[in-house]
Amino acid sequence: MAEGLFKEGIAAARLSPEKYADNFSDLHPPLDHHEALVESDRCYFCYDAPCMQACPTSIDIPLFIRQISTGNPIGSAKTIFDQNILGGMCARVCPTETLCEEVCVREVAEGKPVQIGRLQRYATDVAMAQNKQFYERANNTGKKVAVVGAGPAGLAAAHRLARYGHEVTVLEAREKSGGLNEYGIAAYKSTDNFAQAEVDYVTAIGGISIVNGKALGRDYALSDLTASYDAVFLGLGLTGVNALRAEGEESDGVENAVEFIAELRQARDLSALEVGRRVVVIGGGMTAIDAAVQSKLLGAEEVTICYRRGKEHMNASEFEQDLATSKGVTIRHWMQPKMVVAENGRVAGIELEYTAMAGEKLAGTGKTLRLEADQVFKAIGQSFDPASLNGSGASIAMEAGRIKVDAEGRTSLPKVWAGGDCIFGGDDLTVSGVAQGRDAAESIHLALMGG
Amino acid sequence: MADIRNNFVGIKSPNPFWLASAPPTDKAYNVIRAFKAGWGGVVWKTLGEEGPPVVNVNGPRYGAIWGADRRLLGLNNIELITDRDLFVNLREIKQVKKDWPDRAVVVSLMVPCEEHSWKAILPLVEETEADGIELNFGCPHGMSERGMGSAVGQVPEYIEMVARWCKQYTRMPVIVKLTPNITDIRYPARAAMRGGADAVSLINTITSITSVNLDSFSPEPSIDGKGSHGGYCGPAVKPIALNMVAQIARDRETHGLPISGIGGVTTWRDAAEFLALGAGNVQVCTAAMTYGFKIVQEMIEGLKNWMDEKGHANLDSIIGRATPNVTEWQHLNLNYVAKAHIDQDACIKCGRCHIACEDTSHQAITSMVDGKRHFEVIEEECVGCNLCVNVCPVENCITMDPLAPGELDRRTGKTVSPIYANWTEHPNNPMAKVAAE
Ligand SMILES: Cc1cc2nc3c(=O)[nH]c(=O)nc-3n(C[C@H](O)[C@H](O)[C@H](O)COP(=O)(O)OP(=O)(O)OC[C@H]3O[C@@H](n4cnc5c(N)ncnc54)[C@H](O)[C@@H]3O)c2cc1C
Ligand code: SF4
């Protein structure tokens, strides 16, 4: 029987144990002290710095970098955490190439930005290694706030509310907190159980109690929360998965990319994880890239991403695309799934139709192509599942399938705020979730203390 | 090809780059390596009088300050004169000079300020057939506490006296090395000249403390928790040295006195600047101590290349060329009007020019134009101060463009006058008014 890489179908243990460890080690290894000093010296300390404008949490980047260069990483970490209490995770997962580093004047001038993300990681690592806590809770206000969802948005909101002295209860459906930091982010971006370490770091301020295994809509209703808390923050993320709408979608071996990644993130032994010999991923975003790259790293021989539009339309940044191709993933554009080819109820291949723009609209050309596959991942976007909100007295206003909020994060219901992926108008990034959670907390605080 | 052979007070060397009297010239081993690398000459590490040699500290002798990426900008030392036996040094000097006849070998000396001490050492040096002597009146640390080094260099009368003794007791050219730790460099230079010295060399190191250890509260370099001021050198001191060289070159009394320029020479460019301000050659120490002897190759080739490009045939055609352009503030042309100009293609939009001007100067650079990040000089406000040029990280992105005579200066609303006019005649100058009445 074929071994390892060449095992047919979906199989585990394709690689040697060392190979797993190597494949899933830190994507960007941390800067050491000397490297951090050299890199921080490159920052020009710009006026009204473009990087700061580009960061969704508006970290004072020139200041924190200058603090690193003057030998004050602890002060630097405080500058970061003042704006973004999940600065440690953001330093690892932000697509900096389309955020702060994209507009760095040195990127514009020389194509080599100051490595803001890695410097941010350097400073936050130093502070977190010492468990240096910068914030003290204000005196107890006697106000109680429920936060639903312990993802980036919920954690950021909880921390800011706790700082103001409110009593925060975080209700989280899953067994572990962290949201997609724990279950979604690619394994090589968040190594060494960092997501849990960060949850502990954030909650160390006190005044935050997290209750796991408590799902809104299943264990309690929104109206229960509004009745017993002074305010509610919803940071529910996205739990629905868009369908392929292709024939044969229900065959064995057609899987949801987000679930595959969650399983991978929770796996104690990566060699026990099964992956196909030939994998096709449908989609063009970060999830598609992560599913494809991690399939490859698990030992899949052939991994192909199929995206229905062109390279320039992909949601995944150029860096992410290059990362995938450097790991041996093939990215094919302008094709959409038509039919999953099954043999005995199992995936054997996928039929794709070439696409093209017909005027303003994307349309199938009628020409098809068949790829062999024993595993197909759906990564064509996630959706907000409004089912959890059922049971609330009045219904919450939605927009394009997500919760509608105003500039401060207020929903249409009194006492209810929302932020992160579950709201309309965001960009589905960890750092944006943090910004929205933090800003909603400010708004909640004003509302609670003003009245 | 430019000819960079050097003749300094009769001492010939294949190029104007000498190693200054310092650790790099402490023994034959180093000096031979330097000559192999291409150095034109050396001033041998300072010899003291016969007898048990001085001792150095056994801990750190150097302290430093750094720029970006730990580029060494300034070095300070508390090292004394040579701690090797006088006769070992003399034997080595003699051998080296014999083996390298085309290179300059000058011997630095520091003995007590008494006639018999100088009278005793000079024949010993002469016997080595070295090309000349340099009197170390400069070291600001250690030896000065014993009445030597800068303790002599700070008293013009002593300088004159010792220079005279030396001229009296040796046929060798006498170069007096000056300390910058005085208020006006022209006084010691004039004294050296009166004493008959053939030349002066400057600057020696500047009295300094480079840093303080914030754990132990000891100055650095720290010897068992204590520190002593040292002598500061390296790129950071170059501007001070250039000014002092120019002062001596321009002084009515010392004008024409040969000068060996010292102080932060790191590249051919630095050397060319010293020569242009009137130095006959240069001496280098910190750059060699930072990068090794090989840097002289860059200096030689760089200097030749620039001379060729500009059509300067030999060193005499550049030495002193900038001296006449050094003047007093009161003689600067007040009718010369310049305005900053930002090259928008070169601008990387860091905004440093804006914030420097906005916070600390004349509010003459925009940061936003039509809602866009845009940095542009507001001529109505620009006084032409050059701060923006100096803080801009991109070379030549901001330039200072003079207005042509007849053009409107939008700040003052007046047209630029073609006539040279300086402070001495300015109506706001009370002295000028007196003269006019
Ligand atoms: C595969 C993948 C890779 C990604 N990679 C990156 C990346 O590299 N960089 C980046 O910036 N962003 C990345 N993202 C996006 C990023 O993870 C999200 O934008 C971010 O996690 C959103 O935070 P959130 O708090 O809104 O939601 P989530 O992180 O989804 O957290 C929501 C939390 O709410 C809980 N919850 C949901 N429903 C209920 C309920 N009914 N009751 C109680 N609790 C509930 C969930 O269990 C979860 O813990 C990635 C996303 C995916 C899917
Ligand atoms: S949080 Fe993200 S976008 Fe903001 S500075 Fe840090 S790495 Fe850049």
Image: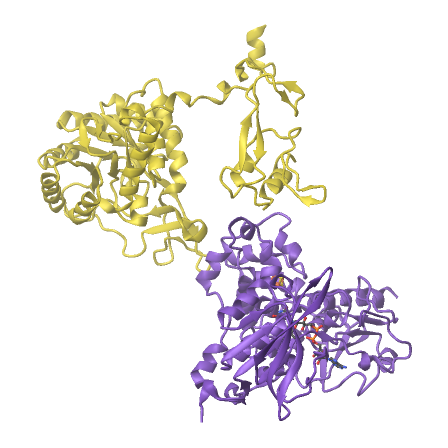
Q: Residue at x 78, y 74 (%)?
A: A234
In the rendered image of this protein, does residue B283 appear above or below residue A367? above
Q: How many marks?
A: 0
Comparing B310 with A285, the one in front is A285
Q: Residue at x 23, y 25 (%)?
A: B197
* Residue B341 located left or right of residue A411: left
Q: Which chain is yellow?
A: B
In the rendered image of this protein, does residue B251 appear above or below residue B16? above
* Residue A156 located left or right of residue B253: right
Q: Position of residue B356 (x, y in %)?
A: 60, 40
Q: Position of residue B285 (x, y in %)?
A: 29, 43
Comparing B295 with B178, the one in front is B295
Q: Position of residue B210 (x, y in %)?
A: 41, 48
Comparing A237 with A39, the one in front is A237
Chain A, hue in figure: purple
Report whether residue A78 is seen: no
